[in-house]
Image (spheres, grey):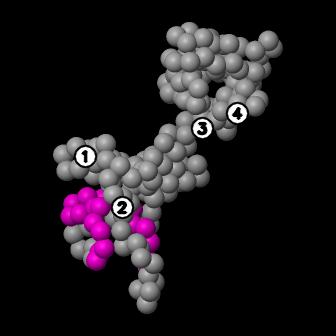
């Protein structure tokens, strides 16, 4: 962020494509803080959403949450519907797939993970009541986490599809796991409530 993030692009020279302009913020593909080089790589002076989202997810995974969120905010503000289509983050053409890297930021922020072979779902441990969505390829829903001392109350809902769970984990600081034997089955539209203890 220190060298590549810019609050505005009024004085930025880019002889290629312009996906950011004027008063908009963004994350450059590359910068050369020690001076220019003879042959910078082709897209060095550009800003592209797919790379911004990838960098933001990496920052969040490394604990640089404020920087990651600032990067996401700059990207989304450029595509808020007032200047550009919010459903078409153009890169090398319209509806370019690389912008789907935005989904990675959601995984980074929630800590969501699903193991189909192990029937294991996990999220990041939280310190305040939280509600997140989840999707595992065959079902989707929401999870509510309510920490209370050394335990966390969980409400796991299947909005569409059904899910079988052998275990549910909260990872990171305060990691803990709940195991289910027999399997916990959550049918479409149902909510399972349980407590995960340290």
State which tag comes first along the sequence, 2 or 1.
1
Tag 4: Cα neighbours inside 10 Å, few (<14), some, or many (≥20)? Answer: few
Q: Is residue 59 magenta?
A: no
Near mark 2 (Cα within 10 A), the count class, few <14, some 14-19 or many ≥20, is: few
- Residue on which the image places disc 4: 115
Residue 175 figure quarter = top right
Label pair 2/4, CB-CB below 8 angstroms: no
Badge 4 marks a residue whose secondary structure is strand
Please give the label number shown on residue 111.
Answer: 3
Q: CA distance from mark 3 to mark 4?
A: 13 Å
Q: Residue at x 74, y 23 (%)?
A: 167
Rate crowding at label 3 as few (under 14), some (14 to 19) or many (20 or more) other CA atoms within 10 Å.
some
Q: Quadrant of the C terminus?
A: top right
Q: Residue furthest right?
A: 181
CA separation in Å, label 2 and label 1: 15 Å
Question: Mark 3, mark 2: which one is toward the viewer?
Answer: 2
Magenta-colored span: 14-32
Quadrant of the rendering where the N terminus is positioned: bottom left
Residue shown at the point (43%, 67%) measured from the top left: 29
Q: CA distance from mark 3 to mark 2?
A: 31 Å
Find disc 1 in the rendering and name its residue.
Answer: 85
Badges 1 and 4: C-beta atoms under 8 Å apart?
no
Badge 1 crowding class, 10 Å Cα cut-off, few under 14, some 14 to 19, many 20 or more, is few
The residue that mark 2 highlights is: 92
Coordinates of residue 129 in the picture (x, y in percent): 52, 23
The mark lying in front, picked from 2 and 4, is 2
x and y, in percent, of residue 48 in the image: 38, 60
């Amino acid at each position: 962020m220190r060298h590549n993030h810019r609050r505005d692009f009024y004085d930025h020279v880019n002889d290629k494509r312009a996906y950011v302009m004027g008063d908009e913020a963004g994350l450059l593909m590359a910068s050369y803080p020690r001076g220019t080089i003879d042959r910078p790589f082709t897209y060095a002076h550009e800003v592209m959403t797919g790379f911004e989202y990838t960098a933001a997810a990496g920052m969040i995974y490394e604990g640089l949450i404020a920087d990651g969120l600032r990067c996401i905010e700059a990207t989304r503000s450029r595509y808020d519907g007032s200047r550009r289509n919010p459903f078409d983050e153009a890169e090398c053409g319209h509806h370019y797939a690389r912008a789907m890297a935005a989904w990675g930021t959601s995984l980074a922020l929630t800590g969501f993970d699903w193991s189909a072979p192990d029937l294991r779902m996990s999220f990041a441990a939280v310190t305040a009541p939280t509600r997140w969505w989840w999707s595992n390829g065959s079902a989707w829903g929401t999870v509510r986490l309510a920490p209370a001392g050394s335990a966390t109350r969980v409400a796991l809902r299947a909005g569409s599809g059904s899910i079988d769970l052998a275990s549910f984990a909260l990872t990171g600081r305060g990691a803990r796991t709940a195991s289910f034997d027999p399997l916990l089955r959550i049918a479409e539209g149902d909510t399972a409530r349980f407590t995960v203890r340290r």
